Image: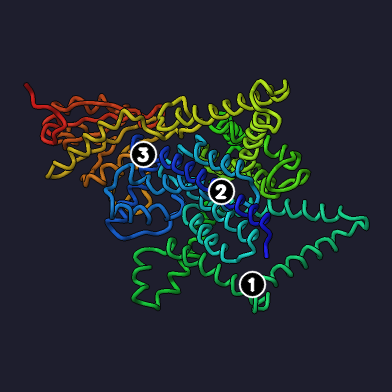
Amino acid sequence: MSSPEHGDRAGRAGAADSRTLVALAAVTVLALALRLYELGGRVFHWDEGRVGYWTLRYVESGHLEYEPIIHGPFLRIVNAAVFGVLPPTDASARLVVALVGGLLPLSVWLFRAHLDRWELVAVAGLLACNPLLVYYSRFMRNDVLVGAFAFVALGFAVRAIDARRARYLYPGAVALALSLATKANTILYVLCFLGAGALIADHQVVRAVGRGTDRPSVRSAVGGWLRARWRGLSSVAGRWHPAAYVLGHVVGIAVAFLAVTVFFYAPRPLLHEALGSPGLWSTVLHEATVGSAEELADLWLTGEMQDNPYLQFLRHEIETLVHAGPVAAVFAIVGFLVDGHVRGRETVPAGRRRALVAFATYWGLASLIGYPAATDINAPWSAVHIVLPLTIPAGVGLAYVAREGWAAVAGPTSASWADLGVVDRETAVLALLVLLAATAGVLVPTATYWNSTNPDHTAAVQWAQPHNEARSTIADVEAVAATHDDGTDILFVGTHTSSRDDAMYVDNESAADRDGAPGGWYDRLPLPWYYERAGATVDSVSADADRAAALADPPPVVIVHAAGRESVAPHLDGYRVTDHEFRLWNFRLVFFIEEDALREAGRLDPPS
């Protein structure tokens, strides 16, 4: 029978947990608001355009195969379902990523045995407001997805160990499989987890060897640790033998992981055909697992995709962290240093560094060192995978500063500001200044990069981002294509440029229908997403084609690289001309749109 004092303590703990959950929920609402407000405000990026186009083609044809160059099939399959409910807009295409990124702060609750309530809220706040996490949660790309699902998988694994309940490993396996379905970076996450876990295990062994007066050997320390784990396992196995208990869960977890992986990686329509023909299941399983792994290895592991200048890429990662993630980077150092050396913490005694904090720090450091070697292009989105683990030690650092400031103001001897000593006043003011600087360090770059297409913002914005001024012209093209009935709606005119011999030209327009395309097609991005959803008929002519013949009977929309503008303009009387930057710099496209077609589409007022 429990004592009244014990009941009071349990009641206070339950109330504190409830308040923490409410705080995490409030932070999550903020995170969702930051990600969902004007989600479609930025023009699609080059990368969004190609995946969006192929998603629409999958919706139309029902054909889908794993293509490692565009990463996992998760977004195409899930967005195909989204487009069955919502129209295919820039906002709806980004919706799933925004929701996953916005809900991520709730997952911090899984680490509640290792972080106190101050730290839980601080980590959640960083996940909600970090500029890189916000920007790439508003972007139809896999980086936030692969990181968020891996973060959740780790959380469930930690919770399974804390609660000694294997049931937490099942949602963890599903989350890890979802991470793998988005991008092969999951392999890097697992390697980082294993490496950081090995360092933590080494710390535990060293600590065990150093305990006591008899100085046990490493072998005996490891043996003792394993025996303790086996006894713990026996206590939760119940009527099962521990070995049978472990084997049963291993099989169940493997089946959960495999089921999700096969669902996403199995080719379509082969997967649907297998539902009525069981004999096809061996082919489905092979293609979804071995076949996909071979394709992944051929491109990303044994190919030349990582043949890049490491130091240049590392410098860019550091610059991105300095400009778009300084709070996470700086306070991660603070949190790692103060952890284990500060008394009064609610989770563990002072003088003992927490495994989770050290683990996340090692994970973040490994990501900083590893991603410049693993990535194929110099892009700020790779820093997402560095910022994500750093939020844990950074949250500890922020909570430490906030707690010190609060303790100085609300100490047991202070009834008012006048009662505070000089040291307490200085501590409170310093803590306030640091927290204000941290808040500004998060909110200012978040507001700066939120929907930016500014060419000076390369710390967060990748170079293949069109400028937002193109939005109105893109809308004109879609409207004209939707109202034009006969023949070609849009004609791309090939041009010799400094980077390509025949930019914009494709000799077979259907060649881009299935997750691959000739080189000239990529120069059009992100336009294929927009003209595909408008149902436009598209054609192109080579840069060497006779302009007078090619434009003798022009369609209502003609698009050409700026280098070919003068060769096209004399043949297009009665066309309105606009030009826009379709990268951050040095890639302008010129749009010739027939004025009569614009009037018919309601995009231009009749002449007075």
The three-letter amino acid code for the residue at tag 3 is Leu
Sequence-wise, the earlier of marks 1 and 3 is: 3
Say the numbered circle drawn on residue 246: 1
Residue 146 in the figure: left or right of residue 272? right
Extreme-left residue of the structure? 608
Q: In front: 593, or 276? A: 276
Measured in 3D between alpha carbons, the distance from the residue under mark 1 to the one under mark 2, in whole angstroms, is: 27 Å
Q: Quadrant of the N terminus?
A: bottom right
Name the image quarter holding the C terminus: top left
Q: Are marks 1 and 2 in contact (CB under 8 Å)?
A: no
Q: Which mark is residue 39?
A: 3
Residue 429 seen in the figure? yes
Q: Dot 2 surroundings within 10 Å: few (below 14), some, or many (20 or more)? A: many
Q: Amino acid at mark 2?
A: Val
The residue depicted at 78 percent of the width and 68 percent of the height is 227
Residue that carries the numbered disc 2 in the rendered image = 108
| Mark 3 or 2: the one toward you | 2
Q: Position of residue 347 (x, y in %)?
A: 68, 48
The residue under label 1 is which amino acid type? Val
Residue drawn where x is 14% and y is 26% of the image: 573
SS label for mark 2: helix
Pair 1/2: label in front = 2
Residue 22: percent from the left, percent from the top? 50, 46
